[in-house]
Image (spheres, rainbow, N blue to C red):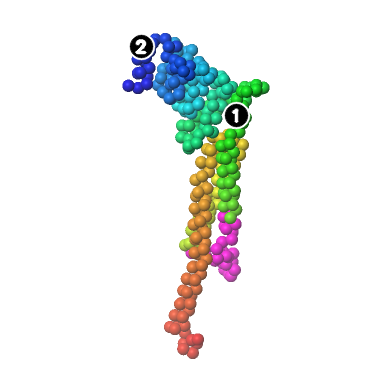
Amino acid sequence: MDHLEIFKKLLQLWPNPDELLNLKEGQNVLHVAAKYASTSVIRYILINPKFEKLINAKDKEGNTPLHVAASQLQFFALICLIVEAAVDLELVNNDNLTAFDIADEQLEKLDATPTADQLLAVPVLEAVKAPTSKDKVICMPKGLHPGRDEEPPHLNRLKDVASTRMIVATLIATMTFAAGFSVPGGYNGSEPNVGIAALLNKPMYDVFVICNTVAMYSSIISVVILLKTQPNTFWQVDYFLRKARLPLLIAIAAMSVAFMAGVYVTLFCPLASLTFSETHDTTFKTFVLPKSEKV
């Protein structure tokens, strides 16, 4: 039996929805459904006219069902509520917080890595232009919650991480850019290949060029993404940090491979070439030149 079936059974026993109340917190059935993201119950209540007064009802802390869904970062419950025209997005609770404020604050307080649903709770409220307390209050009375103006410590920590990663990505981009022109083995100085890389035809040289190019562009992508973390809120910084992680890891790995390929092609390929040249020269002198010309 799902939540909706249970709810209908309860309505048969208590037809008056006001009787279905959590006395301790003063929450009605829609508060509870929003808290646990019971979307079937939420939709049933929203489309039933007799439950209309429950939609924006407040509990003892002044929280509406929308506030409760935001406090639990219940993405699907929020979706069900915000599409209902009767839901008032501007209501504040006893701490002068809107649903947007609460969702943003709860996301910042999370110690564990947030799930995809939790990360989407704030963007979905932004998408419908849900107001914040600072949008509504001109003069903040003494003792009320400061809303979103106060920057949480977690946001500062994330911004420090973003700055550090940006420095690393910038250094990788700089080094790989320079390595693209200061190629291992240098350039050919004799005709007819003047200016051509001396080790151009070596397979490991191709590995060096490919990995160096991948590292440079991956680090540039990472820098561009991390630039977006500077003026943003907690969830935005966290989102862009996650997005920048993969290209940064690719850049580090590709740069490491490029370095190994560069070292290999510089140290071992010329030696192999020299050995082949000496062997070829000895064979030529032995079998082709007359004895009088052999050294």
Determine the residue located farthest toward the right in the rendered image: 139
Neighbor class of circle 2 (other Cα within 10 Å; few <14, some 14-19, many 20+) is few
What secondary structure is found at the residue carrying circle 1?
loop
Q: What residue appears at the point 44 percent right and 83 percent down from the top-left corner?
A: 286
Foreground residue, 289 or 272? 272
For this rendering, which residue is in front, 235 or 244? 235
Q: Which amino acid does label 1 sit on?
A: Arg
Q: Is residue 62 above or below residue 285?
A: above
Residue 192 falls inside the magenta stretch: yes
Write the residue at 56% across / 23% down.
98
Q: Earlier in the sequence, mark 1 or mark 2?
A: 2
User: Residue 243: x and y, percent?
Assistant: 51, 41
**Label 1 close to label 2 by CB (< 8 Å):** no
Query: Residue 237, relative to residue 135: is it above or below?
Result: below
Instruction: Tell me where residue 1 sits by quadrant.
Output: top left
**Magenta span includes 196:** yes
Residue 48, by quadrant, is top left
Q: Tell me the number on the disc at residue 148.
A: 1
Q: Is residue 194 above or below residue 145?
A: below
Q: Residue at x 41, y 17 (%)?
A: 44
- Give residue 20's position: percent from left, percent from top: 42, 14
Q: Who's the residue at 61% across and 23% down the image? A: 144
Task: Tell me the CA gap for discs 1 and 2.
Answer: 43 Å
Q: Position of residue 221 (x, y in %)?
A: 55, 46
Q: Mark 2 points at which residue?
A: 12
- The stretch of residues the image draws in magenta is 176-202
- Residue 48 visible in the displayed image: no
